[in-house]
Image (cartoon, coloured by chain):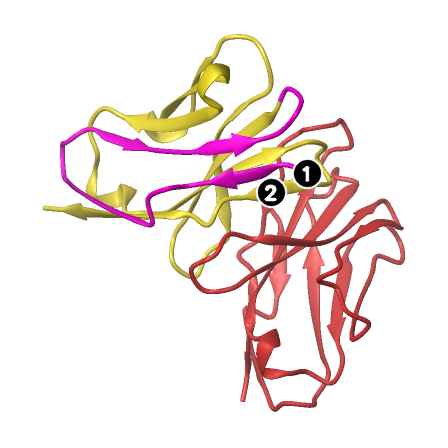
């Protein structure tokens, strides 16, 4: 079965600084990868997804992620963080759409 | 597109009581999923419907839990004889039938057991 590891439980960055959130997956076949964001008390909003093709995918809110098969990684990046980006970020891997596994999440704090 | 709607947003109940949550998916989505999310964790898959058929259930879904989607539209999740460990956020998501279309999530129902 597939699994996801998000090594960083909590990250703090200054507003305007760049951001990279790490995600490593384990799956025997070509994975389907997702990044979601969750604000307190809210559901999850899809930021971006990777199914196939170009390994650098663009998402909403200025986020991008790069699929690296050799490293089993799908790290999320943003060149300049805004205070409104403070939230919990979840990486997920799907073998089929009815069996999506989430990582434990990375909480992002943005310093003024 | 009004998004996935979940009711109630919050439920507080005493241990041993039964609770029922409702999820209204995006109207054209025929797949519907239930997840449980505890503090500091990602969502954990509970069960999944395609139209009215419940196709998969996680081992997390004990026999106190039951989910239905009688007409292939809204779904209910019932927990009988609630326990302290049932306290969590219960999330519903829906998607199109095409494989690996992204799931769209509701805002969840937060359950607190006294």
Tell me the SS state at disc 2.
strand
Image quadrant where one finds the N terminus of chain A: top right
Q: Nearer the viewer, residue B106 or B66?
A: B66
From this view, report whether residue B99 is shown above or below residue A105: above
On the image, the x and y values in percent for residue B104 come to: 60, 42
In-front residue for pair B87/B6: B87
Q: Position of residue B60 (x, y in %)?
A: 71, 62
The answer to which image quadrant residue B103 occupies is top right
Picture disc at residue A25: none
Residue annotated with mark 2: A101
Residue for point 14% across, 38% down: A15
Whether residues under marks 1 and 2 lie with C-beta atoms below 8 angstroms apart, the answer is yes
Q: Which residues are magenta?
A: A1-30
Residue position for label 1: A1
Please say if A102 is above or below A58. Answer: below
**Drawn colour of chain A?**
yellow
Residue B110 can be seen in this image = no
**Residue B11 quadrant:** bottom right
Q: Is residue B69 visible?
A: yes
The quadrant where residue B83 appears: bottom right
Is disc 2 surrounded by few (<14), some (14 to 19) or many (20+) residues within 10 Å?
many
Q: Chain of mark 2?
A: A
């Amino acid at each position: 079965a597939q699994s996801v590891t998000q090594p960083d439980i909590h990250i703090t960055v200054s507003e305007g600084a760049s951001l990279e959130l790490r995600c490593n997956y384990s799956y025997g076949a070509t994975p389907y990868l997702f990044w979601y964001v969750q604000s307190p008390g809210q559901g999850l909003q899809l930021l971006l997804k990777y199914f196939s093709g170009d390994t650098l995918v663009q998402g909403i809110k200025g986020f991008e992620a790069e699929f690296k098969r050799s490293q089993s990684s799908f790290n999320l990046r943003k060149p300049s963080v805004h205070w409104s980006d403070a939230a919990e970020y979840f990486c997920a891997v799907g073998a089929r759409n009815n069996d999506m596994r989430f990582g434990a999440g990375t909480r992002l704090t943005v310093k003024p | 597109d009004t998004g996935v709607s979940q009711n109630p947003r919050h439920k507080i109940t005493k241990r041993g009581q039964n609770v029922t949550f409702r999820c209204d998916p995006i109207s054209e989505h025929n797949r519907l999923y239930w997840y449980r999310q505890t503090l500091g964790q990602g969502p954990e898959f509970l069960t999944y419907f395609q139209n009215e058929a419940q196709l998969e259930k996680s081992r997390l879904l004990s026999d106190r839990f039951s989910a239905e989607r009688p007409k292939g539209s809204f779904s209910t999740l019932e927990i009988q004889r609630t326990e302290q460990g049932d306290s969590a956020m219960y999330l519903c998501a829906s998607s199109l039938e095409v494989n690996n279309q992204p799931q769209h999530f509701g805002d969840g129902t937060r359950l607190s057991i006294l």
